[in-house]
Amino acid sequence: MENRSLVTIANYTKEKLLYLIEMAHEFELNPNRKILDGKVVATLFFEPSTRTRLSFETASNRLGARVIGFADPKVTSGTKGETLKDTIMMVSNYADIIVMRHYLEGAAQYASEVSPIPILNAGDGANQHPSQTMLDLYTIYQTQGTLEGLNIYLVGDLKYGRTVHSLLTAMRHFNPTFHFIAPDELAMPQYYKMYCEKNGIKYVEHQDFDSHTIADADILYMTRVQRERFTDLMEYERVKDRYLLKKDMLFRARANMKILHPLPRVNEIEYSIDDTPYAYYFQQARNGLFAREALICDALGITLEDIRNNNK
Ligand code: CP
């Protein structure tokens, strides 16, 4: 049987990404369609989340599915020693699809190999966050009118930030130029730089973060320093406030430049920026609903045509 799990965005072709963007757009036009009537969606969150879990659950509810799951693994039998495999096998007895966030890189891949039902990776450690990437692509397309040939600046924690790893992987189809702005300690890992080289993705590395550096950005993608991934909290303290985007850094920005952030923000974007036309991170998070409606449907074998023909 075809494995319809979403573990990494790297598995998706350009056509598939564009198809899912079209599907997400269909859901933006009408997010309430009872196309998952009778289905059960399980959300298993082994790590904290606000947006990803709530938008997956809202997506399920708006499509007529029921939701089971947990937001805190401490309330599960994992605390008694139950393995991830057994947890997945149990939940697959009850649900039609599993959305899982886990703190270990590779956990989603493993779950997809043992699960008889589709797994949607809602973030695995510092590795990948493919559903975030779908909403990021949707947002970039929505704001720029294209995904082709854009200047995308990734700022902050490029080492542990799984959202930037996934975004970079997906953008290989669209001839981007990436600019990596990070302190040495949080630089883009060699693995992803080699990935860029292998896939013909242009990139430039910077340490300065000022109005000149970001003047030709189409997308300025800010990220939080991922405190939870540090083994040395002193190092976290040294780097955590290195890159703060201030309003007075935007006066050279392109008219249509948009600031994205997967959120939560801690101290990366001044609050005064929220009211500027550049800020787009709250709309970006809103798009998570539509992108995740599309991903759930696709994983359950529901097509764009099915959605357009659905009258419920
Ligand atoms: N962007 C994101 O993954 O947010 P949450 O951690 O709140 O789900």
Image (tube, rainbow, N blue to C red):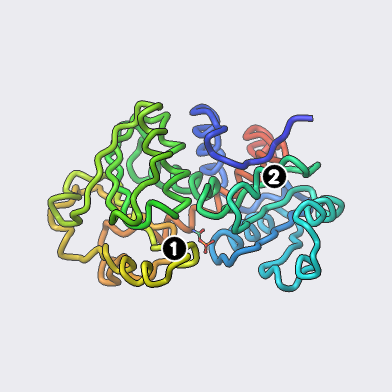
Dividing the picture into quadrants, the one containing residue 204 is: top left
- Residue 110: mark in rendering: 2
**Residue drawn at (73%, 40%), measured in percent from left and top?**
113
**Residue drawn at (63%, 60%), measured in percent from left and top?**
58
**Residue drawn at (70%, 59%), measured in percent from left and top?**
44
Front one among 310 and 15? 15
- Above or below: residue 189 compared with residue 19: below
Dot 1: within a 10 Å radius of its alpha carbon, few (fewer than 14), some, or many (20 or more) residues?
some
Q: What element carries label 2?
A: helix
Asked whether residue 275 is in view, the answer is: no
Marks 2 and 1 in Cβ contact (< 8 Å) = no
Q: Residue furthest right?
A: 93
Asked whether residue 295 is in view, the answer is: yes
First in residue order: circle 2 vs circle 1 = 2
In this figure, which residue is indicated by the disc labeled 1? 226
The amino acid pointed to by label 2 is: Tyr
- Above or below: residue 279 compared with residue 75: above
**Residue drawn at (76%, 65%), measured in percent from left and top?**
78
The amino acid pointed to by label 1 is: Gln
With 273 as the anchor, is 284 left or right in this view? Answer: right
With 36 as the anchor, is 126 left or right in this view? Answer: left
Q: Is mark 1 on a helix, strand or loop?
A: loop
Where does residue 2 sit, x and y in percent of width and height?
Answer: 74, 30
Q: Quadrant of the N terminus?
A: top right
Where does residue 105 sit, x and y in percent of width and height?
Answer: 58, 50
Where does residue 142 sit, x and y in percent of width and height?
Answer: 39, 44
